Image (cartoon, helix red, strand yellow):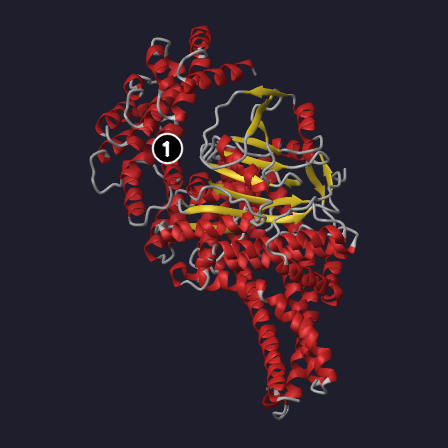
Amino acid sequence: MSFLLWFALQFSQFTVFLYFLAINTVYTVLIVLAMRDIIRHAYLTTSRVARRQLAGEFYYKPVSVIVPAYNEAAVIAQSVKALTNLHYPEFEIIVINDGSTDDTLARLKEDFSLVSSKKPVRLQVPHEAIRAIFKSADYPNLIVIDKENGGKADAINAGINVSSYPIFCSIDADSILEPDAILKSSKLFLEDDELIATGGIIRILNGCRIQDGSVVEIGLPGSFIEAMQVLEYTRAFLSGRTGWNALKSLLIISGAFGVFRKDMVVAVNGYRKTIGEDMDLVMRLHRHCKDNAIPYKILFVPDPVCWTQAPFSMKMLLKQRNRWHRGMIDALLSNRGMILNRKYGATSLVGISYFVFVEFLGPLIELFGYVSIPILYFLGMLNTQFMVMLILMAVFWGISINVAAVFLDTYNFRRYKKTSDILRLCLLSAAEFFGYRQIMLLERLRATLSFRETAWGTQDRQVFKQ
Amino acid sequence: MFDFITESRNFYDYITLAVLLLVFFNTFEILFLLYNKARVERSERKRQNLKRLASTALITATNAAELLPKPATEDEYAAYSEAVASVLDSFEGEIADRAAALITQLGIDAHYRRLARHRTWYKRGNAVDILASFRLKANKEFFLAIFRSETSSEVKYRIIYGLSRLVRDHGDILVLARLLSSLPYLTAKYTEDIFYNVITALKAAGREEEFGLFMRDTMHDESVLKMVKRDCLAACSAAVCEKGRATLLGYYAAFPGEPEILIASLRALAGIGDFSQLPAALKHPDWRVRLAALKFSHLCCTDMLPEVRAMLHDPNYHVRLNAALAFARSGDAGRAVLRAEESSDDRFAAAAAAYALSQEAL
């Protein structure tokens, strides 16, 4: 065998090994930071503080809740109904029917007694033409915009232009906000003038029971795919985003629930039409503030909760993950000037580097690791004992990170109260490494190869479980 | 490339040990998770029961301290402090006095005073928050003492909040203002909240006019940030500081080039029913001042209609829209103006008028 081939194989093994160590170390550091942050948060967010917020009716900033909707006829009425129940002194709900081809608008008209409104719209950020604006005769703070199809980013931009308040919250149409979610997230804008964006935790609605637009019973969904997503979301939000918070490098505020200062979003020309519009916006906000020396903060807070419907079939899940990965690549490419650029500080050197080297290159390296096993075996170069040990370490290390995320959730928030649910989550922590992770890996690779595609694809919705 | 690692002495022993440690750690983690879940649920139940018991005893019995067990654990202290704070927020007179007395009788304040000196800042912050919720006069000196030795700004802001609820006279306001200015400006709402507490406390003590005096003294004090002056005015508005009318008018006259102070003064004045500055404010060069004035224009009188009508043609979107809405709220005369403006050559004014009329129809 040529020396070059031998060297290439050895080098690739070494790279895979280093990747394994690096990725697990990053996750461990994140979870330790998250643990510290969440314990601190638990101390400072007491019921006493909450009562003070509720009692102080003068201490709020009015909020516009923007809900882009495309073919959401199955869930839109319930979602909007839930929003009308929010505990907040002054807010408006702006639903944008983004050229739906189903009955979304008809459902809204029927359920909320919509009448035409002639509100003049100030064009601050670009979007497709608005066909009509409606107001609800039943709910004075509900506005519905009917516009030409332009995608989610475009729809939110239209909502921004129509909105009246200095802070806006964008949520998905298939999501349900907990009644105090706006109160908990917008209070941060009162506490810190430098805050320009914040996001709360997204939890999986599948398996929960809804009554009058509120989640009344929380349970782990029965199916493997849905339950696995509960674990993934818990890990991603409680250990991932809380950890990035501590490192001042938060790059994603989920499109399903984010609260923003409108003037800052207008300053960066609103959302860009892309499939990863949430990450792209946050990256541009970082860039704008650093470029213009504006002191700013972008934070994740773990207690405001938004419940969202997760894909319930493998096909839908893969489609979603493919879109997320393409969105991430697009956001990185679009903001490539921020990669390894000292001007952008920790955001670039820590946050963006993680996305480039772990999230973007990671799947390639991991796949290489899997592929190299049979090659090395046939070439007689495989150290089986070492390989087995490495896999065992990877699995057990991964499990401990997953269980730590479940622990964080159980320690502070105790959403899943049944012991059987928690034990199932622990079991899923191990099951993830045998098949599920590899399937997701392949989909992320497919997304990497087709990153130029901008299609969203359609998402099936289920009527919420009553 | 791995040879130097894999062929080193005891390599596999170490890696096996690492795997075993991970297995052990995972098992421990899961067991601890389950144990902790059970423990937290048990303590939550106990805490709720104790809180209920304490609340009932405070409301129904004259000797609550004798009926309640002395707190021993952190959870028990937390339960009592929540119950007491809730009673103090909801009741006055004898029941509130009993709740305040219970804090000392059961050693709750002593416990949190100890915690307010804890080495971890967020535990100190939490203890200060709890002490602040008791509103005990005796804590004033304690707060001042710990402020001097405190190193964390986060905790210092909380101490100032606690002190703001204990203000009794002009001297206390000055001390509070001095402490506040020793820290970096936090946020408008924080400062407003502090002064809201001050006004509320002074009102309760029947000395509301002392806040007006404080405002008058700081009006031309260069060492006080303009933002703080604005927040004081906002607090006057929130707390409806009726006895500060002269000072509020003074502020409006003294800062003609400061839109934020003008807006805060206008709001505070409107809150106490004084609309005398609105005509001038409607012509102010800054659109934010015009907008703030418009929000109250329908409340005062209809003789401002010509001034407001001119604002339907204002270059600013918000001013035009709010001028139209002001007309919509001004009865038949206002609606007549809007109907006339609907066919205006100025399409922006026409759009605003049409919108206001459609709102009116709702």
Q: Residue B48 location in percent, x, y?
A: 64, 46
Q: Residue B72 location in percent, x, y?
A: 57, 56
Q: Disc 1 marks which residue?
A: B235
Q: Mark 1: few, some, or many residues within 10 Å (few <14, many ≥20)?
A: many
When the figure is inspected, residue A49 is found, relative to residue A412, above or below; the finding is above
At x 60% / y 81%, what residue is drawn?
A8
Note whether residue A429 is visible.
no
At x 61% / y 92%, what residue is drawn?
B8
Q: Which image quarter is the N terminus of chain B in?
A: bottom right
In the image: residue A276, left or right of residue A458: left
Q: Which image quarter is the C terminus of chain B in?
A: top right
Q: Residue A107 location in percent, x, y?
A: 70, 28
In the image: residue A271, left or right of residue A86: left
B46 or B61, nearer to the observer: B46
The kind of secondary structure element at disc 1 is helix
At x 23% / y 28%, what residue is drawn?
B256
At x 36% / y 18%, what residue is drawn?
B313
Q: Residue A465 location in percent, x, y?
A: 76, 40
When the figure is inspected, residue B261 is found, relative to residue A301, above or below; the finding is above
A424 or B95, nearer to the observer: A424
In the image: residue A175, left or right of residue B300: right
Tally of numbered tags: 1
Three-letter residue code for mark 1:
Ala
When the figure is inspected, residue B91 is found, relative to residue B1, above or below; the finding is above
Q: Looking at the rendering, which quadrant does residue A428 occupy?
A: bottom right
